[in-house]
Amino acid sequence: MKQMQQINRNFGFVTVSSRVVALSALCGLSACGGGLGENPTISGRLENWDQGAGHSLQVVTATSPMVMIASAPIDEAGSFSITLPAGGGPKLGPFGRESLCFNIPSCSVQVDVEEVNAVEVAFVIPGVSAVQPQNRSTGTITEIGAYFYVDHDITVTGQRIETNFTFTYNFDLHYKSGWNLRTQSFASKSTTFSTGKPIEEFLWYWGIK
C-alpha cells in the first residue's frame, strides 16, 4: 500500500516493466480534453497480458487507508471496462490549499476557492502490480496521469520555486466538477501539474513494482 502512495505522490520516479495497457476513455457528454463527467467508463486491453483469467482491475483511493471504489474483471486476453463512481466514492473529503498543491511547504500558488471536496484514485491489479498511465515516448517517463474527482470547478495556477534545490513546481490545473485526468510532466529542473490532455496521449503500464 505504501508503494501505491509513492507512485502517486513521489512524482512518478518508479521502475516499470515493458508491459503496457492500451486504453480509451469513453467520456459521455464531456470532452476528453476537459472534465470527464460524473461517471466516465474506461475501457482497454492490457498489452502482453500473460496472467490469464481470474484477475480484476481495481480503482482505489490514493491516500491511506485505501478504499476500493470500483472493480472490473480482466479477461484472459487482458480486456477490461471499468466505470468511475458518480460522486467520487465514499472517501470524498475536504482538500485545502496545501493539499491542492501536494503539501509542498509554503505553497504560494493561486487557488480560486479555499476548499473543495475531492478524492484522488489509483489503479491496481491485486496480487500482480500497480497500473499507471504514462508517456514514455522518448524512452523515459516524461509524463504520468492520475484521476481526480472534485465536487465543483476549481482552478489552481502558479509556480513554486525551491531555491535550495533550484527546482520549480508549475501548476496549471483547471478542474471541472466531476472526474478529471491530471497529468504531471517532468523536466530536468521542474515538474508541471496540468489538466486538459486526452488519455489517448498515454499508455497504461502494468508490472509496476
Image (tube, grey):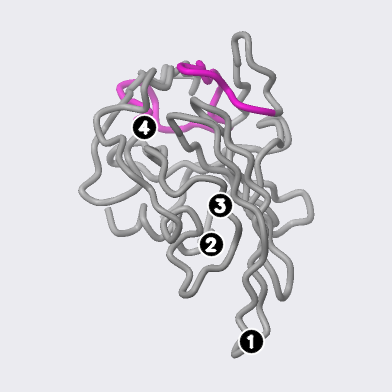
Kindly state the secondary structure of the residue where label 3 is placed. Answer: strand
Q: Farthest residue toward the top?
A: 29
Which image quadrant: the C terminus?
bottom left
What residue would you read off at disc 1?
Answer: 163
Q: Is residue 170 above or below residue 38?
A: below
Q: Type of residue at label 2?
A: Phe
Residue at 31% from the left image edge and 50% from the top image edge? 63
Q: CA distance from mark 1 to mark 3?
A: 22 Å
- Numbered mark located on residue 209 in the image: none
What residue would you read off at disc 4?
Answer: 59
Q: Position of residue 126 (x, y in %)?
A: 29, 38
Q: Nearer the viewer, mark 3 or mark 4?
A: 3
Residue at 43% from the left image edge and 19% from the top image edge? 82
Q: Which residues are magenta?
A: 34-59
What residue would you read off at disc 2?
Answer: 11
Q: CA distance from mark 2 to mark 3?
A: 21 Å
Q: CA distance from mark 3 to mark 4?
A: 28 Å
Q: Position of residue 117 (x, y in %)?
A: 37, 37
> Is 177 or 20 nearer to us in this picture?
177
Residue at 30% from the left image edge and 27% from the top image edge? 89
Q: Nearer the viewer, mark 1 or mark 2?
A: 1
Kindly state the secondary structure of the residue where label 1 is placed. Answer: loop
Q: Does the segment drawn in magenta span residue 148?
A: no
Q: Farthest residue toward the bottom?
A: 164
Kindly state the secondary structure of the residue where label 2 is placed. Answer: loop
